[in-house]
Image (cartoon, rainbow, N blue to C red):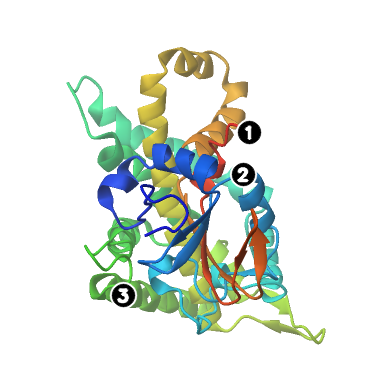
Amino acid sequence: MTDTVPDLYYDPFDIDIDANPYEIWRRMRDEAPLYRNETYDFWALSRFEDVEAASLDPKTFSSAHGTVLEMMSANRVPTEMMIFMDPPEHTRLRALVSRAFTPRRVSELEGRIRELCAGFLDPLLGAPAFDFVQDFGARLPAMVIASLLGVPIEDQNWAREKIDTVFHIEPGVGMINDVSLNAQIELHGYLIELLEERVRSPRDDMMTDLVNAEVAEADGTVRRLEIAESATFTNLLISAGTETVARLLGWAAVLLDGHPDQRADLAADPSLIPNGVEELLRYEAPSPVQGRWTTREVEFHGRVIPQDSKVLLLTGSAGRDESK
């Protein structure tokens, strides 16, 4: 429970709370901006200025112990995945993202995206109803990111289904479960095979770019990524690019249906769409909770978070902070 406000309880594993956490998060911002949960041994920051400050301070709030509550521990995560790294390692790998998502590569996808949208939606014309997420929202980003990476078209549906399984939530356990881990192993093995093929037969795709990518080490030496590193990086791109964008598209449908006037504005003036996307991301963040590990004592609102503590940065709450 919390020792700050007796009747205020935030449980990130509670399905009912997770379905609509905004009232609890509002109370946390007002009554317990530094929240303590003894049951799951974590602290939480919910105000915009606090979440922003912590997000910009990786020396104090480390990602290297995991960024999901159920996997966080005193041991650093043994991984080559960028999201579980801190600078300078994170910075070196992040440069690969900038080089991979070049304007040329992204612009070349426009035709594929239009083709996919038409292929998914045209058969639904005249239908009395359809499932926006299953028939469109969850399919489109998976196929787009797979096309960008160079996953064969005939394998893209399989990859999407495998990614869905990777994000399987086990009741009472969370994301760390056998179903998820087995899917992750299978997907990782498949990507290694594709990358090894790119070494033998290069193509004009992002996986070929990754097997040829070079990174600068701390001592100034430059080396190419190993296949296992490239596979981990590819896995991150295809998984995160699928799951988070699917959430964005799902929320876009719900919110624009609930605000038809704003939907009409976007349809009438496409120049409003970029800011509309930013607003959707603020209002319903696809990734609303980020876990961090404290490397030293740090004080917020007159209280001290001890060194080696789990902290949840509630970006979903920060995006609704009335004071900002």
State the separation of the CA atoms marked 2 and 3: 34 Å
Q: Are marks 3 and 1 in contact (CB under 8 Å)?
A: no
The residue positioned farthest toward the right in the image shown: 220
Crowding near the residue tagged with mark 3, few <14, some 14–19, many ≥20 C-alpha atoms within 10 Å: some
Q: Which residue is mark 1?
A: 323
Instruction: Tell how many labels.
Output: 3
Crowding near the residue tagged with mark 2, few <14, some 14–19, many ≥20 C-alpha atoms within 10 Å: many
The answer to which of marks 2 and 3 sits earlier in the sequence is 2
State the separation of the CA atoms marked 1 and 2: 8 Å
Secondary-structure class at tag 1: loop
Q: Are marks 1 and 2 in contact (CB under 8 Å)?
A: yes
State the separation of the CA atoms marked 3 and 1: 41 Å
The answer to which of marks 3 and 1 sits earlier in the sequence is 3
Secondary-structure class at tag 2: helix
Which residue is depicted at the point 63% across and 61% down? Answer: 97
Q: Which residue is mark 2?
A: 48
The amino acid type of the residue labelled 1 equals Ser
